[in-house]
Amino acid sequence: IQLTQSPSSLSASVGDRVTITCRASQGISSYLAWYQQKPGKAPKLLIYAASTLQSGVPSRFSGSGSGTDFTLTISSLQPEDFATYYCQQLNSYPRTFGQGTKVEIK
Amino acid sequence: QVQLQESGPGLVKPSGTLSLTCAVSGGSISSSNWWSWVRQPPGKGLEWIGEIYHSGSTNYNPSLKSRVTISVDKSKNQFSLKLSSVTAADTAVYYCARGPPTTMVRGGSFDYWGQGTLVTVSS
């Protein structure tokens, strides 16, 4: 299953609302996770089951969607949120990731 | 708190075999979870390599299946990756991660990750 994220990169300011989209090449129900990765660091789980916030993740992060279309929203971008975000499907094998969306400072 | 730590050679010669180990602490590899390997070429995205359960059951990415072996050592609480016939295209940061419990045929997530280790394929 191919996952396509859009945009590939975006520039935003602190306080902005940011939305990243992940589209699956076929239906994956709600079996989607979102990760944040900072340079030189391992990915960090943000959301699983499309909309369930991982423990300890700030509530400004939210996820939605099912089937083939999913979104990750950051309600008010903070300085520590500048990073690359990946979606991942766990509906079937092989597990696949989107190509990533880089969130940069405007 | 589960912690994972990758170890192994940082340099492998072309046509050789890449070998890495992931040590698990703060939890048991005999838990109900899958244990995965993921890699990331420099400046690129994430690629799932495969996973293992403590029973020895495995799932591999078809794109790498002919060259990959993942094994588990319950006595050392660790699992390992071997990738044969490597080329420069296998140069990447390799991560180990804890996957979903096996009771979840679908769904879950990779909730704990190692820090990653860079493996360069070069003569």
Image (cartoon, helix red, strand yellow):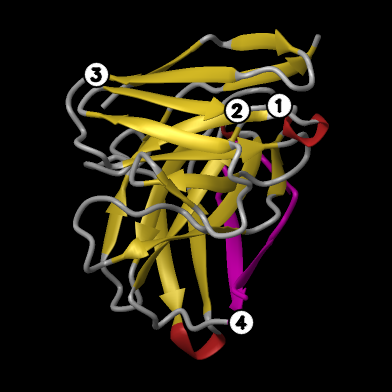
C-alpha distance separating marks 4 and 1: 33 Å
Q: Which residue is rendered at x = 62% and y = 76% of the image?
A: B1
- Residue closest to the eye, A26 or A64: A64
Label for residue A3? none
- Residue closest to the eye, A26 or A106: A106
Farthest bottom residue?
B75
The quadrant in which residue B5 appears is bottom right
Q: Position of residue A85 (x, y in %)?
A: 58, 29
Q: Secondary structure at mark 1?
A: loop
Q: Position of residue A8 (x, y in %)?
A: 56, 11
- Residue, disc 1: A77
Q: Amino acid at mark 2?
A: Ser
Q: Which residue is rendered at x = 77% and y = 34% of the image?
A: A39
Q: Same chain for marks 2 and 3?
A: yes
Q: Amino acid at mark 3?
A: Ser
Question: Relative to B23, is B123 on the left or the right?
Answer: right
Magenta extent: B1-26
Earlier along the polypeptide chain: callout 2 or callout 3?
Answer: 3
Earlier along the polypeptide chain: callout 1 or callout 3?
Answer: 3
Q: Same chain for marks 1 and 2?
A: yes
C-alpha distance separating marks 3 and 4: 37 Å
- Mark 1 crowdedness (10 Å alpha carbons): few <14, some 14-19, many ≥20: many
Q: Is residue B2 rendered magenta in the image?
A: yes
- Residue, disc 2: A75
C-alpha distance separating marks 1 and 3: 29 Å
